[in-house]
Every structure is written in structure tokens, then in C-alpha cells.
Amino acid sequence: MPSPDRRDTWNAQTYDRFDDARSRPFQDLLARVRSVAPAQVIDLGCGTGSGLADMARRWPAAQLVGVDASADMLAAAETELGPLAEVTLVRADAQTWAPETAADLVVSNALLQWIPDHAQLLTRMASWLAPDGWLAIQVPGNFEAPSHQLLRELADSPQWTDRLGGVLRGANSVFDAAGYFRILTDAGLTVDAWETTYLHVLTGPDPVLRWTSGTALRPVLAALDDDAAQEFSGQYAASLGTAYPADDAGEVLFPFRRVFAVARREERL
């Protein structure tokens, strides 16, 4: 997520429109973490705090730290958590922040795709782990899907390229499962990495546009004034309607690939 001195373009309400679908990958990620009673847990890029809440319920004795660059997201996280746990929320840039003490679990859910060359950050995150500590990450892997290809093509079109050239990143934004396996293995961890394609069933007007407006479309909307953003969104919605047509029941099938890795720093006897 952007560093605090940049314009805060994250909108918690927009992001949470598809909370059930967005939270499922995190549940699948956390299910592979075998830590029994972690004392120190870090959520890097904690967003609206739903993941922190899940971890607070699973490990009520843990000291949780949620880090995010967005004030809007952190405000939503504070509301989400309520009385669930003693949680420290920190507004900071994930690329420069570091914990003061070793962690038993470091989680990063749908953050790393925003950070160029995040292999270095992953290596740093691995260094934060205590013996027998766990690291768990998930990133979207759908940059070559029609939703993202059409977005880049429109942004690079003659009408928009002067204002949007270089705003969007491509498939090199993330690694595949093997890439994360190698990075974390080189950092001295024992790694389990995999990929899953979820099939989301979306309904309502322009459902894929509404999905992307909370994530992939966000850099475009941040770069345009309101009138231009509305025009761009209309053109993008028309392309999405062709690529993702609704069936007779009004449902749109939206495949979404995600990449996971769970790693452990083995305790040496």
C-alpha cells in the first residue's frame, strides 16, 4: 500500500463490498499455519482489520500488531476489532517499517503486489521471525486475466496514455508459487507454496467493475479528476461486459487466481 506521505486513495467501504469473497483466501492461508500459541503476531498491510479479527479469535492471548499505510483502512480496522483483542495499529510504509522484537507469526495478505521488487521485503520479513516462527503470504495472481489486460489496454490507449502511462503494473507484479518458494527457501525457511483459482459468482450491475474499483482500478481513479474517472470507468465497464457476460440468471462468473506461501523457521536443537 502507498506510503503515508502519498495521497491516501484507499476506501474501506469500497474494498469491503466483496468481503466474503476477499476473506476466503485469507482463511485458506491461515489454515496452513500450524502455530499453536503465537505470542507476537504481525499483520503487514492489515487493511480493514478483518484478518486481525480472525487471528484474535484464533489466538486470543496473542499480542497483535497491524500495519497499514492508509488512515481510512486503519480507522475501519479499529472499528472492526472493537473489544476483540489488545491490538496495536501502526500507520507506516511496509517497505521501511520493522518490528522491535521477533515475531512468532508474520502475515501479509494481498499487499506485496503493490510493492515493486518485493523479494527484498520478503527476505526482511523472514528475518523478523523467532525460532519456530511462521510467515504466511497471499497475493492475487490474475494480472493476465481479461479484467487486468483490458484495464492496461485502455490506460495505454491514445485517449488516456498521456494521463495514465505507467500507472498500472503488469504480470511481473508478483511471482508464481515456485518463485515465492525459492525466495523463502533462500531466506532459510521451510516452505509450502501453492496456487488456487477461485470462481466468484458476481451479480448486480457491472459487478466486475465494482470488484476492481476497490483494488486494480484504484491507481487509475486516483490519477484522474472526477469527470475523467467517470468516462474511463464507463469505457472499462463496456469492455468488461463483453469479457464477462452475465448468464440467463444474471450471474457473472469471475475466475480469480491467487498465489500462497506459508513458511516456517525451523527451531534448531
Image: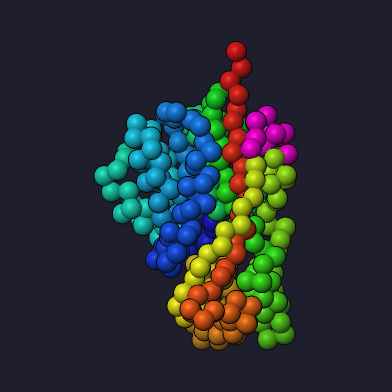
Residue 42, position as x, y percentages in the image: 47, 39
Please, which residue is most extreme toward the left here?
Answer: 83
Residue 15, position as x, y percentages in the image: 45, 64
Residue 127, position as x, y percentages in the image: 60, 32
Residue plotted at (49% across, 71% down): 202
**Nearer to me, 189 or 12:** 189
**With 189 as the anchor, is 226 left or right in this view?**
left
Q: Is residue 184 magenta?
A: yes
Residue plotted at (60% across, 64% down): 255
Q: Quadrant of the N terminus?
A: bottom right
**With 29 as the anchor, is 84 left or right in this view?**
left
Residue 160, position as x, y percentages in the image: 66, 82
Residue plotted at (61% across, 42% down): 261
Numbered range of the magenta stretch: 182-192
Colouring used for the render: rainbow
Where, by quadrant of the figure, is residue 222 drawn? bottom right
Where, by quadrant of the figure, is residue 268 drawn? top right
